[in-house]
Amino acid sequence: MTSTRFPSPKRALRLIVAGAATVFGAVGGLGAHATAAPPSAVADPAPQDLWTVPTAPADTATLIVAYSFGNRIPAGVDSTRTIGAPGPVNEQLAAAVVAARGDRQTPVYAQTEIASVLKSRYGMDDVISIDPRRAADGTLVYLSTDGVAAEVAQLRGAAVVTDAAAVIAFHDHSWRATKTTAKHGFRAFAPEGIALPDQYDPQSGQLWTTSPFLYLPTDFAGRLALLK
């Protein structure tokens, strides 16, 4: 009888990242810096940390930024025109926001799916909801992680340079959400001691958020694009 040896989680992650780096380098997706690097540097991303999320105490935050993950689309609803229901993952993300805020009055900026739960379930009427825009034909325009961070930065204005943003996001999205928030000028971190949801919703209305097999390749590609 023979057995198959599977790579460790970190080794598997490095293999995926290395493969993605090769593809990105071939199409120029990583920019001039990556294509100019020697092949060994592109194939081995070890010098770049793609999994450790910076943390800090929640009470050091000057704002909380919460990124949604998936949704639930009711039967018969046109998902291109109607924002879906929050679903269980965004309900857990809302609970994480409440835990991170505690009894402080820290400003909260949350995507629609999380903001709606914060208002209806927790009475957080001062949450600033980051909502998707609509195209001229009334269809929803997808709001990316970068789009959310950019809008929050615009709303904060000059305060960005001194802001400390506690980032609430799905576990596998946390690295990219935190890094993207930092890219827009914030000191960004995951709040210490706050549990982030890590179970995918197979009934999510966004297909790529239904399982790690569908989500992680795209997320890792996004992480590579954020490397400097």
Image: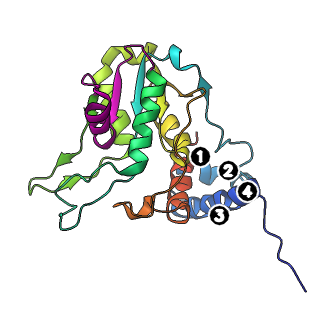
Query: Residue at 52% of width from left, 44% of height from top?
Result: 197
Labelled pair 4, 3 in contact (Cβ < 8 Å)? no
The amino acid on which the numbered mark 3 sits, given as a three-letter code, is Gly
Q: Which residue is mark 4?
A: 9
Q: Which residue is mark 3?
A: 19
Disc nearer the start of the sequence (1/4): 4
The amino acid on which the numbered mark 4 sits, given as a three-letter code, is Pro
Quadrant in the picture for residue 56: top right
Query: Residue at 67% of width from left, 50% of height from top?
Result: 37
Badge 2: few (under 14), some or many (20 or more) residues near its Cα, within 10 Å? Answer: few
- Observer-nearest residue: 144 or 110? 110
| Residue found at the very far front of the displayed protein | 121
Disc nearer the start of the sequence (2/4): 4
The amino acid on which the numbered mark 1 sits, given as a three-letter code, is His
- Left or right: 115 as drawn, with respect to 63: left
Tell me the CA gap for discs 2 and 3: 16 Å
